Image: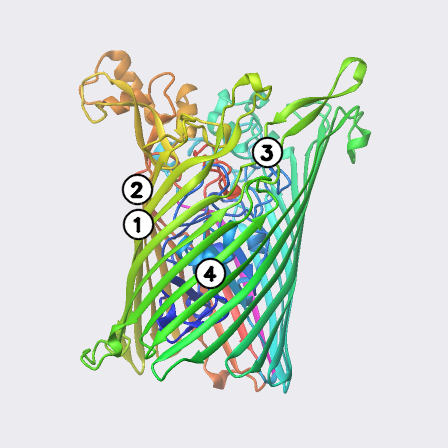
Amino acid sequence: YQQAIEVEGLVVTGEAGQARRREIGNSIAQITSAKFENLPVLDVGDVLAGRAQGTIVQQSTGMVGAGQTIRIRGNNSVSQGNRPLVYVDGIRINSDPFAGGNSGADADEARQAVSPLNDINPMDIDRIEVVKGAAATTLYGTEASGGVIQIFTKSGTAGAPRWTLQVTQGWHELGPTRLDEIDPEGPGRGLGLLDCTDRPGCPKSGSFLRNGYVQRYNASVRGGSGDLTYFLSGQWNSEEGIIAPQGNEDYSIRGNFTFSPLDDLTFQFNNNYAHRAVQFIPDGNNADGLLLNLFRGPRGYTPNNNDSLPLEMQLHQTTDHFTTGVTTIWTPAPGITNRLSAGLDWSEADYEEELPFQYFRDLEGSREDDRARVRNFTLDYSGNWETDLTADVSSRFTWGGQIFDEDIVVLNGFGEDFAGPGAKVITSAAQTEVFSERRLRETTGGFFFQERLGWKDRAFVTLGLRVDGNSAFGDDFGFEAYPKIQGTYMVSDHSFWPSWWNTMKLRAAWGESGKAPGVFDAIRTFSSIAGDNGRPGVTPSNLGNPDLGPERSREFELGFEGTAWDSRVSFEFTYYDQKTEDALIAVQEPPSKGFVAPQLRNVGTISVDGIEAGLNVSVIRRQNFQWDVGSNYSTNNSLVESLGGAGRIAPNGSTWDLWIIEGQPLPVIFGRYPTNAKEKGVAPVLEDQALGPVYPTDNWSIDTRMVINRRLTFDALGEAQWGHWLASGTARQNVRRDQWPECDAIRAKIDAGDIADLTALQQARCASNPRYATWASPAGFFKLRQVSASYRLPESWLPGTVRSATVRASARNLFTITDYPGVDPEAVDSGSQDDVLWRVEYYNLPPARSFLFSLTLNF
C-alpha cells in the first residue's frame, strides 16, 4: 500500500548527506518496509515492482533463483547498458547479473542468470530510495544516467534485545499462461507441458510440471544500550522449481552496528554475506532446451521424441557475495557535518555445465566451468555547512568526492570427449581448452560542490557541479563536468492557502549525468593468434579512439506534490525530458585502416520523455476499520534521433526483426507485417514496417490495504504494462514445423481456398515460413502481482515471552489479463540477464504462481 508524501521526511539518495523532501527539486521514490512487510516478496525485484513511479520490473522466467529486468525511465543507451546503479548503506554493490560478457559466468544453456541484487534479504530492508534520470543523479557522475537505487538496511535501537522469527512454507506452480487456449485437448495438452502422456520419458505424474516446495526461515535481533546498537539477522531459503530438478538454495547473514563514542562522532558498520546455489534446466534458445523440444513434439532434437533427455544435463551456478562498509559521521561544530564512507563489495560466481557420458547430443560428454570474480571498492566523502545568512535566508554548502574502483576477473574452461562415465574434471577430457581469460579494471574518480539557498524555509534553489575522470576515457579526452540546478517552492506555506489542502510543493530540476565507455574501448588492441608452425602472432582487434568520452545525458523535469484533507490524500506528478548526446555507437571504419571491427564513437543522440503520477487515498479511517488505496502511472517514450551514420543496428549483435533505427524507439520491431492485417478474405500484403518498441511505454499499478479491528489485514498489488510489442519466436518456430494447433484449422481453410472469414494476419502467421515480425503483437498485460491476508493473534493466546504473533497467507502472480497470442508476455529469452536490448519470447519457462503461508513471532 502507498503512504502519504511527507515533505519534512528525510532523503539521502541524490543528495550529499540528508535533506528534507521540501528542499529537493527532483522526484524521488521512497519505499518503506511498511509497504511490503505483509506481502509475499521474495527478492528486491518483488519490492520494487509496481511501487516506484517510472521503474519497471519484469519477471522473465519461472526458474527460481534467476534475476529480473529493471529499468528506470526506460533505455537511453545503445551500447553501454541501461541498468541502474545500486547502493546498499552507501556502498556501491555489483548488480550485474552473472551472465557472461565482462562481468559474469555464462549460464548460456539456461538462458537466464543469477542477479547479485537478490542477495539482499527483503526482511533486512528498512527503506529503498530511487532517483531517476540525469536531473537527479548528477552527483553520482559518469555512470549514473540509468538511475540510482539505494537500499538502506535496518539498524539497531537502544533497549533490550527484540527478536523476530519467521517461518514460511508454500509452493510454486505454473503461472497463468495461454497454453490451455493454444492446445486445449487430449494427450500432449498444452504443447506437451500440461500433459505429456503421449511422449516417451514422460514422468509417472503425466506432466513434467510439479508443485515446487518452498521453505524460508528468518531470524533477527535488534537492541543496544548507550553508545552501541546492533541489528543482526540470518535467513535460509530453499525453493524447488516447477520442473525437476530445477531449484534454488540460499542463505545470508547480516550484522549492522552503530557506535557513538562521542556526542559528535558516530560510526556505522554494516556487513552482509550471502551464498546461493541454483540448479537450472536447459531453457530458451538452444537445442537442449526442454520447452523447445517438448513444444516441437516430433520435430524437436531429442531422439525418439524422448523429451526427458535434456534434463540429464547438469547446470549449476553458485555465488558468494560479501559486502562490508563503514561510515563515519563527525559533527565538529553546529551546522558542520562530515561523512566518510568506505566499503568493499566482493562477489564470485561459478557456473558448471556438464553433459554426461552418452548424452544424446554429445555421446562422449563435455564439461564447461566459467568463473567470475568482481571486486568493487567505494570511497565517498561529503561535507556540509549549514548556516543562516539572514533571518530569512539559509545556506547549505556541500563539498566532497568519490572514488570507485572495479576489478573483474573471468575464467572460462571447456573439455569434451571423456573416456567413460563418472565424476569429471576438464583436464580429464580428450580435448581441453581454456578459451577465455579476462581481467578488467576500471577506476572512476570525481569531486563535487553544491550550494542550496533557502528563503523563509519556503523556497529553495540548488546549484551543483560534479567533475569526473575515468580510466576508460581516451587519452585526449580529459575530465567531464556535470552541472545541476534545482528549485522548489512550498506554496502551501502562505497564509492564503486553504487549510484543507495541507501541503503543496512545486519543483523543477535540470541536470546532467553520463555513462563511461568500456575499459578497452578507447585503446588500440590486438588479439593473439597461432601463426605458422604454431608460432605466436597477433591480429588487429580494436582500432581505438583517443578522443572517446562518456555518453552525456541532459534532463529537465517539472512537477508538484502535496497532501490534502488531513493527509488522507497525497498526490505527485512529474514531467521529464531527457536527451543523451555523444551516445556511444559502433561505427564501421574504412578497411584500409587494417581494423575490420567497428569502433565506438561519440556520435549518437537518443531522447526520452514521459510523465509520472501517483495518487494515494485513505478512503476510510475509523477506529476499527481502515482502507487505503494507492496508484502509480508512468509513461516512457524513447526516440533514436541519430546513430551518427551507422545505419540500423542489430541489438546485441542479433536481430530476429529487432533493430535500432533512427527515428524509431530504442529498440523497435521492424520487419515484414501485413499492411492489410485486419482485412478478411484477401491475401496478406507483406511489407517492412516499424511495429513498436519492445519495452513498455506505459506502466500502471494499483495497491490497497484494508485493516479490520487492528488485527486482520488484507493487502493486494496489481500492475499493468502496455505500449510495447513482443515477437513470439515460440509460435513462429512451431508454425514452421506444423506444431501450432491454433493454425490447424486456418491452414485447412487456406488449402481449401476458403479464406472468406480469415484475416490477412491469420493467413500470414500460419504460412509455412512466417517472419518473426509477423508473429509480433502488442504485449500489454495486467497481472495480480501479490495478495495477502494477515491476522495478528490476540495477546491473551500467547505465552509470556512472545510479544506478538502474526499468521499470514499470501499468493504471487495469481492471474494475467492479456491479448498477447504467445505463451506469456513477460517470458523472454535471456530476460534475467537484464542488460540486453534484444527481447523475444522463445521457448522460455513462464513466471510461476506462488502460494505461501507464514508465522511471525516477536519476542
The mark nearer the N terminus, 2 or 4, is 4
Query: Which of the two discs, 2 and 1, sits closer to the camera?
Result: 1
Give the percent coordinates (x, y) of residue 151.
52, 63
Magenta portion: prevailing SS class: strand
Please check the rendered image and state whether residue 198 is part of the magenta-colored stretch, yes or no.
Answer: no
Task: Please tell me which residue lies in front, 73 or 166.
Answer: 73
Task: Please tell me which residue lies in front, 498 or 756.
Answer: 498
| Type of colouring | rainbow
Give the left or right position of residue 727, taking residue 312 as reference. Answer: left
Query: Which of the two discs, 1 and 3, sits closer to the camera?
Result: 1
Please check the rendered image and state whether residue 165 is part of the magenta-colored stretch, yes or no.
Answer: yes
Query: Which of the two discs, 2 and 3, sits closer to the camera?
Result: 2
Instruction: Confirm or deny contact between disc 4 and disc 1 (CB under 8 A).
Output: no
Q: Quadrant of residue 290?
A: top right
The residue identified by callout 4 is 40
In the picture shown, does residue 361 fall above or below 785? above
Give the percent coordinates (x, y) of residue 419.
80, 25
Q: Quadrant of residue 627?
A: bottom left
Q: Quadrant of the C terminus?
A: bottom right
Q: Considering the numbered disc 4 on the image, is that residue within a helix, a strand or a loop?
A: loop
Amino acid type shown at disc 2: Gly
In the picture shown, does residue 205 fall above or below 623? above
Give the magenta-colored segment's residue range. 161-176
Amino acid type shown at disc 3: Glu
The residue identified by callout 3 is 109
Identify the mark at residue 723; answer none if there is no mark. Answer: 2
**Residue under the point 56% across and 24% down:** 597
Label 2: few (<14), some or many (≥20) within 10 Å? Answer: some
